[in-house]
Image (spheres, coloured by chain):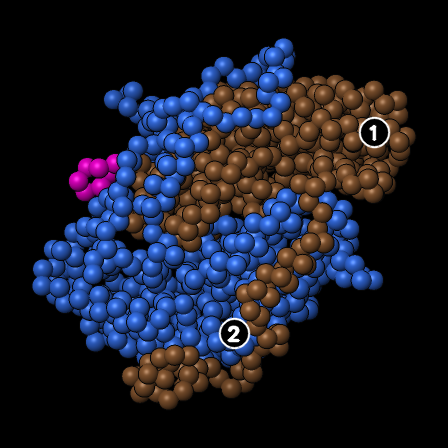
Chain colours: A blue, B brown
């Protein structure tokens, strides 16, 4: 069955007109209030719309219906772990005891928040096999940045000046970017014939200059790096640290852990593995776990339990300080904590088992019509190639992704990792039923076998707009209504 | 696991364990040492009960600001950001099926552009502190210099975050002092610190003390070759001049005030805007206006060649996940308030703070406001007893006091930063003043 997305009036809210019915307490008492600010700082014009609440609600609810989400359907976006976001977490994160609490309140008045953070840290330590966790980083990439700062502080403390970070070419883009932001020179090593870390290439790249090697396991092809112990040995013998990109942690909970694999630093993506929603781009949360030898460098404050009370500990002379203001995306942490309670240890392991089962099942149903480079057994995701489709019919990975939209599925991640030509990276997650996977597989096969390739090349047809001109967007760089109007004036 | 066996069979397998046999024995773990799962009702009960040990600003008048603010969140904003289609979507990689989120984010960018007077806005940073860190590195990209000036009068956490962001590229962060009478920046000191190496100057309007700094509008003229970064409270821009109109190259701010609850400090919303000519040097995701193949208006993420997933180690920033949903909240919030609503809100905040300043000023032992200047909704007072001790006494009376300034700014050990907003009733102000009267 085909999908048909809603299509409403698409004028910007700035183009709509009305009269606001919003009321602010005390605004009646503003008569006679003058001398608001230094004269040179007073505003003379403010071009904002005014609309009644009814119009605003209509506008944004209609917009929402022109947006696809996990709650609408399958979202097999590889590496993003778009699993179902349970609704009890919505209830909890909206509680006044979450929403209406100021971060600078006295510790005695926020014992609930502190305890939740303390317990969540302990649960994450168990999942990752780490000794301590900081919940401060706002997102996965910030977790990576934090991890790099920790590596820097750690090596500096031992009097070492290590200037390089090594990453595989298949790494998520944030890895090299985060390392560079922390001031490291980034060395990318090519993947081996099997799509995994090439141990010889790694040995050649690692030296006394290496601060850390960043890797995700399973890797971005969904293949478990079975030589992980050998990798760890090479890295550690050179005095470097091993960093675990937790984006793919959903594949291995309870089966192995970064700690068991001998990693030193780990970041978690709570908005992936721990089922918190992604909000159209964020907020997420990117806690970081470390082994004991890195604990002294963690960001301040640390939450501690002293004499039955939870406290903030700022007294950490070797700490890297802060990576963001306050303590982390607390409302997201509440959701993740609730998810962990609901699942329990067995439930988290079951989630990983289901995710891997779903992924392999789906892969099995697709590997004859699409190509599956490298070995067969995958973890939570797999990467197939549209190379044959492109050669035979001129249909690219992008086109297949766009055509999926017409059937009410989000597209997989496309063109990543770069070592696979015309890549489609598919992660079904544990949330989907066999029936949904079967239907998705049927559609994927149908697209590959489509008689008229033009139908696929010109997709999507059933969405609120058709194929979007991204080149024009980049050329013009119109990022606001104000910029648009200015451009229009110039002609 | 309904269907699991069937699925395994189809793959010619008999057990899920076979799917994990590529994990070497020596790194396997045997399950997780965590409690068993709970039913939904138990989870709700457990977490609610745990959090019931928090005191909330709903029940206890709270006079804290300094980076997170207690403003009213209209019910319509909650309704809008609770929509599954916004809440449970990913970054809009597929624009055709994500026009709703893209347009909402474009509207957010448009609102911020109007407020700041700057045409280019990203669709969010994590918070104001990381936006500042990104602003400092962007200044370096603009003029290839590496000395960044910041006010001494600033939240220490923000300074710490900035130093971490500046450490990678080796940007030198230098503080300029404030005028001890007005709380504004010390112009002589600032002048003495601007060198040919100076890349950017960061000024907050209002500043950490809540002071609306009258020096800000003249700085670009005096230092035309240095990038000017203004840190603004977006609500104050309802009445204050747009930073772009007095030469700001970049404007950042804490967008949490625009319809996002305090959330014990997160998620917040990092506002980031810049001049159009700098757009290709800016960090973060941006939504651009374009058209589809039929020539219909459409939106998509754009200028992605600046970003980590394309440019990797050469990207302008590592940011990937941001605070998009909070940006939607901000757009919805500004839409509900409208032009008059935002102007009035800014005025009410000024008026309420003035009222409280005066009320406390009438107490003999308190110096309020401590700085002689225009304030927005925060101000400093000097207290007769240590602010930490004062806060404990206030808490006993059910009041959440202000922020002790010790540890943030030197030589202000007996000083407290108070914040008041439209959320405080007259009775709340009376209760605070009465409690202060009792302790003196």
Q: Chain of mark 1?
A: B
Identify the residue at the far left of this view.
A451
Q: For the magenta stretch, what is the residue range?
A: B290-297
x and y percent of residue B54 in the render? Answer: 70, 51
Q: Which residue is mark 2?
A: A347
Q: In front: mark 2 or mark 1?
A: 1
Q: Secondary structure at mark 2?
A: helix
Q: Secondary structure at mark 1?
A: helix
The numbered dot on residue B434 is: 1
Identify the residue at the far front of this view.
B41
The numbered dot on residue B28 is: none
Question: What's the magenta bit mostly, secondary-structure-wise?
Answer: loop
Q: Nearer the viewer, residue A9 or A385?
A: A9
Q: Nearer the viewer, residue A181 or A292?
A: A292
Res. B377 visible in picture? yes
In this rendering, position of residue B223 left or right of residue A196: right
In this rendering, position of residue A443 left or right of residue A49: left
Q: Quadrant of the N terminus of chain A?
A: bottom left
């Amino acid at each position: 069955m085909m999908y048909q997305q809603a299509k409403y009036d698409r004028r910007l809210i700035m183009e709509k007109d009305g009269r606001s019915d919003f009321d602010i307490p005390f605004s009646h008492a503003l008569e006679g209030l003058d001398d608001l600010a230094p004269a040179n700082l007073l505003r003379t014009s403010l071009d904002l719309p005014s609309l009644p609440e009814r119009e605003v609600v209509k506008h944004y609810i209609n917009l929402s219906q022109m947006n696809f989400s996990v709650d609408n359907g399958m979202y097999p976006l590889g590496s993003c772990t778009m699993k179902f976001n349970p609704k009890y977490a919505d209830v909890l994160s909206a509680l006044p005891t979450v929403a209406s609490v100021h971060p600078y309140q006295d510790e005695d008045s926020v014992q609930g928040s502190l305890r939740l953070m303390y317990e969540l840290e302990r649960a994450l330590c168990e999942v990752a096999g780490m000794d301590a966790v900081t919940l401060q980083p706002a997102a996965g990439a910030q977790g990576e940045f934090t991890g790099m700062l920790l590596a820097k502080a750690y090596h500096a403390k031992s009097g070492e000046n290590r200037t390089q970070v090594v990453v595989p070419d298949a790494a998520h883009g944030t890895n090299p970017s985060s390392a560079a932001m922390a001031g490291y020179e980034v060395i990318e090593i090519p993947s081996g014939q099997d799509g995994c870390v090439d141990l010889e290439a790694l040995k050649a790249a690692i030296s006394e200059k290496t601060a850390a090697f960043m890797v995700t396991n399973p890797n971005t092809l969904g293949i478990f790096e079975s030589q992980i112990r050998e990798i760890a040995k090479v890295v550690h013998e050179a005095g470097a640290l091993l960093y675990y990109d937790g984006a793919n942690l959903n594949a291995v909970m309870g089966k192995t852990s970064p700690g068991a694999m001998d990693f030193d630093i780990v970041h978690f993506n709570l908005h992936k593995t721990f089922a918190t929603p992604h909000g159209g781009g964020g907020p997420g949360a990117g806690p970081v776990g470390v082994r004991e030898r890195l604990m002294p460098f963690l960001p301040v404050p640390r939450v501690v339990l002293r004499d039955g009370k939870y406290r903030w500990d700022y007294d950490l002379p070797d700490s890297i300080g802060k990576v963001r203001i306050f303590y982390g995306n607390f409302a997201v942490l509440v959701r993740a904590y609730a998810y962990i309670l609901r699942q329990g240890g067995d439930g988290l392991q079951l989630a990983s088992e289901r995710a891997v089962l779903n992924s392999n099942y789906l892969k099995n149903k697709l590997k004859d019509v699409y190509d599956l480079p490298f070995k067969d057994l995958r973890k939570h995701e797999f990467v197939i190639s549209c190379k044959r489709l492109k050669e035979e019919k001129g249909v690219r990975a992008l086109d297949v992704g766009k055509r999926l939209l017409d059937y009410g599925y989000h597209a997989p991640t496309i063109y990543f990792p770069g070592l696979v030509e015309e890549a489609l990276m598919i992660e079904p997650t544990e949330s989907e039923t066999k029936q949904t996977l079967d239907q998705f597989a049927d559609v994927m096969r149908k697209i590959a076998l489509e008689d008229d390739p033009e139908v696929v090349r010109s997709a999507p047809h059933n969405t609120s707009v058709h194929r979007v001109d991204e080149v024009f967007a980049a050329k013009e760089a119109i990022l606001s209504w104000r910029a648009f109007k200015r451009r229009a004036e110039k002609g | 696991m309904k269907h699991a066996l069937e699925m395994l069979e189809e793959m010619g397998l008999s057990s899920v364990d076979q799917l994990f046999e590529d994990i070497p024995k020596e790194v396997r773990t045997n399950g997780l040492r965590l409690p068993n799962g709970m039913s939904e009702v138990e989870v709700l009960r457990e977490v609610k009960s745990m959090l019931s040990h928090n005191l909330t600003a709903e029940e206890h008048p709270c006079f804290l600001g300094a980076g997170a603010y207690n403003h009213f969140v209209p019910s319509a904003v909650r309704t809008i950001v609770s929509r599954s289609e916004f809440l449970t979507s990913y970054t809009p990689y597929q624009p055709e099926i994500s026009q709703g989120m893209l347009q909402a984010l474009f509207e957010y960018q448009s609102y911020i552009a109007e407020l700041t007077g700057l045409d280019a806005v990203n669709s969010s940073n994590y918070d104001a502190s990381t936006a500042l860190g990104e602003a400092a590195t962007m200044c370096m990209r603009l003029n290839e210099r590496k000395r960044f000036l910041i006010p001494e009068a600033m939240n220490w956490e923000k300074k710490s975050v900035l130093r971490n962001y500046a450490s990678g590229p080796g940007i030198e962060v230098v503080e300029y002092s404030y005028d001890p009478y007005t709380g504004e920046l010390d112009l002589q000191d600032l002048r003495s610190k601007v060198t040919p190496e100076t890349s950017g100057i960061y000024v907050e309007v209002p500043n950490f003390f809540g002071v609306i700094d009258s020096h800000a509008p003249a700085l670009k003229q005096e230092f035309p070759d240095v990038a000017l970064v203004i840190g603004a409270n977006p609500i104050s821009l309802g009445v204050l001049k747009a930073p772009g109109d007095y030469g700001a190259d970049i404007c950042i701010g804490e967008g949490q005030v625009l319809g996002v609850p305090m959330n014990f400090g997160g998620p917040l919303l990092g506002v980031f805007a810049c001049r159009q000519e700098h757009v290709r040097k800016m960090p973060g995701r941006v939504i651009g206006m374009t058209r589809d193949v039929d020539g219909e208006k459409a939106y998509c993420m754009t200028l992605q060649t600046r970003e980590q997933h394309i440019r990797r180690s050469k990207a302008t920033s590592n940011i990937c996940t941001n605070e998009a949903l909070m940006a939607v909240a901000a757009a919805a919030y500004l839409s509900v308030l409208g032009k008059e609503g935002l102007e009035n809100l800014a005025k009410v905040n000024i008026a309420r703070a003035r009222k409280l300043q005066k009320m406390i000023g009438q107490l003999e032992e308190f110096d309020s406001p401590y700085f002689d200047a225009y304030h927005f909704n925060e101000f400093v007072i000097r207290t007769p007893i240590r602010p930490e001790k004062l806060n404990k006494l206030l808490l006993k009376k059910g009041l959440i006091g202000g922020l002790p300034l010790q540890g943030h700014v030197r030589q202000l050990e007996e000083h407290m930063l108070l914040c008041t907003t439209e959320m405080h009733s007259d009775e709340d102000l009376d209760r605070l003043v009465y409690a202060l009267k009792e302790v003196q």
